[in-house]
Amino acid sequence: MMAGTRDSGLGTREKAPVLTIDGPSGVGKGSVSARVARALDWHVLDSGAVYRAVAAAALEKGLKADDEAGLVSLCESLDLQFEAGDNGILVFLDGRAVDDRLRTESVSAMSSKVAVLPAVRAALLDLQRGFRRPPGLVADGRDMGTVVFPDAPIKIFLDASVEERANRRYKQLKEKGESVKFLRLFRDLEARDRRDRERAVSPTVAADDAVVIDSTRLTLEQVVNRVLDEVQRRVDSSGT
Ligand code: DC
């Protein structure tokens, strides 16, 4: 099912349930979110891709990371859509599929700079909330359960050790034939975790009412099933 920033005028949007999946970099939130969204036939939001899209547009236009006014006006013109694919969340910018363009080193670096600006985060709030519509939304990010959808009825915080996340990334890159060093990946992840957890605005922390799932020793399938069990538990307990 496709969720977009356009055509967001459904009257019951605010009442649609949201399942938030937050967690650190490289923990597999995208794969889990896509699988869960497909199983439930809900919409999906990749909030990391929202920040990456702002960063890519800023780089294209030659904007600096401290040009808050310029960045905010970029946020207002973003046309993003997401779809739950077989292997992760598919991103569409201006109606066209984007893949590696949002994953380059320069876009990653710029996205982490724009993500610390309170004006940018505030400008992206409505856009992200616009994806909430029936029958429901799976929202993947860092602050979905704490800031963007604090009233979400189901919140998951997905975690895994740095070693395990570095290992998974190492295997993925090796399979793609890229030459990588495990230690470099490990140290990069450690540094990124520290920045994300310690930043002043929207740090990556579990919401008080989030269910924490440590996926260090779990397969993707097992994590997806744990999340779906949690959804079922909430449905049973609310009697709907
Ligand atoms: O998850 P990701 O690597 O695609 O995220 C890209 C950047 O955006 C990263 O620096 C973290 C940031 N981000 C954020 O600040 N808040 C979110 N809800 C999602 C991502």
Image: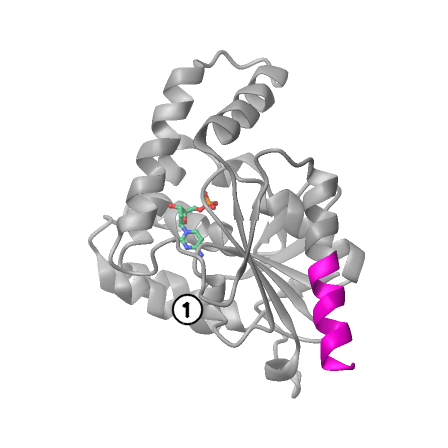
Q: Amino acid at mark 1?
A: Val
- The residue that appears at 66% across and 83% down in the rendered structure is 10
- The residue that appears at 72% across and 42% down in the rendered structure is 222
Provide residue 220's location: percent of width, then percent of height. 69, 39
Please tell me which residue lies in front, 72 or 114.
114
Judge whether 13 appears above or below 220 on screen: below
Q: Which residue occupies the extreme left position in the image?
A: 66
Mark 1 residue crowding within 10 angstroms, few (<14) / some (14–19) / many (20+): some
Query: Horizontal placement of 78 versus 214: left or right?
Result: left
Please tell me which residue lies in front, 105 or 226.
226
Q: Which residue matches tag 1?
A: 147
Judge whether 53 appears above or below 191 on screen: below
Please tell me which residue lies in front, 137 or 53.
137
Query: Horizontal placement of 91 versus 119: left or right?
Result: right
Q: Main secondary structure of the magenta part?
A: helix
Query: Horizontal placement of 163 versus 84: left or right?
Result: left
Which quadrant holds the N terminus? bottom right
Q: Tell me, yes or no, if residue 84 can be seen here.
A: no
Provide residue 232's location: percent of width, then percent of height. 76, 65
**Magenta highlight range:** 229-240
- The residue that appears at 57% across and 35% down in the rendered structure is 216
In the rendered image, residue 238 lying in the magenta stretch gets the answer: yes
Provide residue 37's location: percent of width, then percent of height. 72, 57
Provide residue 174's location: percent of width, then percent of height. 58, 15
Q: Tell me, yes or no, if residue 155 can be seen here.
A: yes
Q: Quadrant of residue 217?
A: top right
Which quadrant holds the C terminus? bottom right
Q: Which residue occupies the extreme bottom position in the image?
A: 11
